[in-house]
Amino acid sequence: MAFMVSPGIDYVAVQWGIWRAGGIAVPLCIYYPLPSLAYVIEDTQTDYLIVSRAYVSILEKYKSDSAIHFIEMESILALVKVELPQISKNRGAMVLFTSGTTSLPKGVLTTHAIIESQISTLVKAWNWSSDDYILEILPLHHVHGIINVLCCALWSGAKVEFLNPFSAKEVFRVFDEGKLNVFMAVPTIYFKLISEFENLPLDEQKRLSARMSNFRLMISGSAALPVSVMTKWKEISGHYLLERYGMTEIGMAISNPYDGERRAGYIGQPLPNVQIRTVDEQNNLVQDGEPGEIQVKGPCVFKEYWGKAEATAKSFTEDGWFMTGDIAVLEDSYFRILGRDSIDIIKSG
């Protein structure tokens, strides 16, 4: 069941409604052009397409597709109520698409058990509670926005406030209200926030710095955070950002500690219940201080690439380790990413 719904309560209701009904949720990016959306819809062989009124015109062609049930979000409440099934944790729950280092995206299938493992691990590692209040500014067709922010907050009984589209000025307006205590973003966003902050009057800067100093936790992920940005953000917010490492196929696997030393330029240590090893090109374990590919095993690892059995098989070793393709080095118990083991394709559009 694919859905193209704006961030907010409607998104949450549709996603959790699909899960509760026993469907596999396929969130569509609200910024993608039709060809990219069509690839996801057709690759997953979508049966149901749930669309907010704002996006109906983009997906108009699927209204006449006899193989797809096209449902406008605003009409859902008028549908007949039915008894909901009991759902096994091993049932497929979500397909998210990742480009990785190949030219065509692959759908990553996770089950309810895998999602539960990803969420519960982060809730414990990052001390989530019902007292938390977070701003959701990240795309809701990726792990970072869906699992790390939205699902961890909902699991914990915390509050989520949505902001779409992103605006550095609006982020600081929400900060200034004094309700937030958790914030997660990517390096590009922190860079934009720093630029906005530096253009504010001195009295506003002081007020915002005081507000941010009261936050419980601030996290950066999805890309390497330049040390210069880390240092500048510490200067204006009082927070040494927590960096972590993950990907669509595994959720989060490595993190700097919530309590303890956070090292700039390092992704940290393995999260609980996640096994990590680094190996050379012959799949032999490497010594500390030597570069090797990160391989992951544990309940957080995805089930399969949707409809791509060969690609799935090639992504795992014979003894069941997922091969991330990321090269890292272990230095004094902390991992540091060095790069990829193959050439990345940059989609400039």
Image: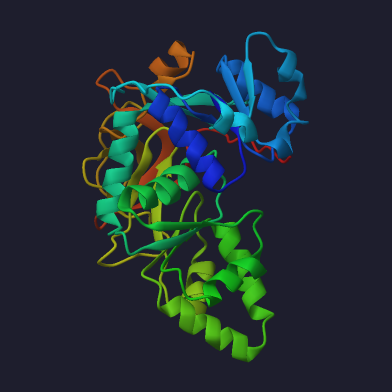
Residue 307 visible in the current orientation: yes
Q: Residue 83: where, in percent of width, then height?
A: 37, 22
Q: Residue at x 43, y 35 (%)?
A: 16
Name the foreground residue: 78 vs 115.
78
- Between 82 and 39, the one nearer to me in the picture: 82
Q: Report how many numbered discs are placed on residues in the image.
A: 0
Query: How is colour applied across the structure in the image?
Result: rainbow
What residue sits 67% from the left and 87% below the top? Answer: 201
Which residue is located at x 53 percent, y 68 percent?
Answer: 229
Q: Which residue is located at x 47 percent, y 46 percent?
A: 144
Q: Quadrant of the C terminus?
A: top right
Q: Is residue 196 left or right of residue 304?
A: right
Residue 155 to residue 233: above or below: above
How far across and down, in percent of the image, does residue 77 sit? Answer: 55, 33
Looking at the picture, does residue 144 appear above or below residue 343? below
Residue at the far bottom: name it: 203
